[in-house]
Image (cartoon, helix red, strand yellow):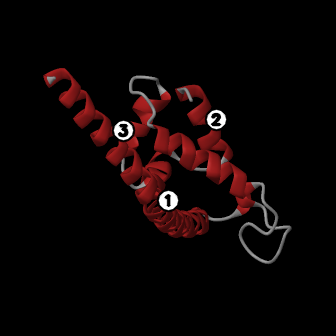
Amino acid sequence: MNGKKLKEIRKELGLTQTELAKLIGRTTMRTVQNWESDKNAIPDYVDEFLKNEIHQRHTPNFVSNNSNTDFKNLSVDDKLNYLFKQNEQIIKENEELKDMVDDLTLKIEISLAPILRHFKLNADSKEKNNNKSSIN
């Protein structure tokens, strides 16, 4: 993503540079300015964060049960509250996915342990045989 695209997305979300900086939570308005002017590279996490916000914006019932709610007409506080809640939900989902990956990794390691042990024993045995034949 380049600075021009970042600025376009920020405006589409109806956010100022300061509001975007607060929403991201890891940066300042000055950093957003530098990203938009292509003085600094835009980190991948910002790109992913904004893609998610755009996706959420186009999802039906994204703010309330009223599907006619228009994101652009919400107050800045309502926009920020919504985006913070979405961010918290994503973090929770990511933690759940990480736990699932950790569980699966452990199961795979446990399943592969006998196979790996077998190959290690065979390799050790071949090495011993090679050592014996080179001595003789």
- Relative side of 19 to 125, left or right: right
- Relative side of 8 to 67, left or right: left
21 to 41, vertically: above or below:
below
For mark 3, what is the residue?
30
For mark 2, what is the residue?
8
Label 1 packing within 10 angstroms: few (<14), some (14-19), many (20+): few
The one nearer the camera, 135 or 90, is 135
* Amino acid type shown at disc 3: Arg
Circle 1: element type: helix
Q: Residue at coordinates 49% horizontally, 30% vertically from top-left?
A: 36
Q: Quadrant of the C terminus?
A: top left
- Relative side of 25 to 58, left or right: left
Label 3 packing within 10 angstroms: few (<14), some (14-19), many (20+): few
Q: Residue at coordinates 40% horizontally, 51% vertically from top-left?
A: 118
Name the mark nearer the viewer: 1 or 3.
1
117 to 44, vertically: above or below:
below
Percent of width and height locating residue 59: 78, 59
Circle 2: element type: helix
- Label 1 – label 2 distance at C-alpha: 45 Å
- Label 2 – label 3 distance at C-alpha: 17 Å
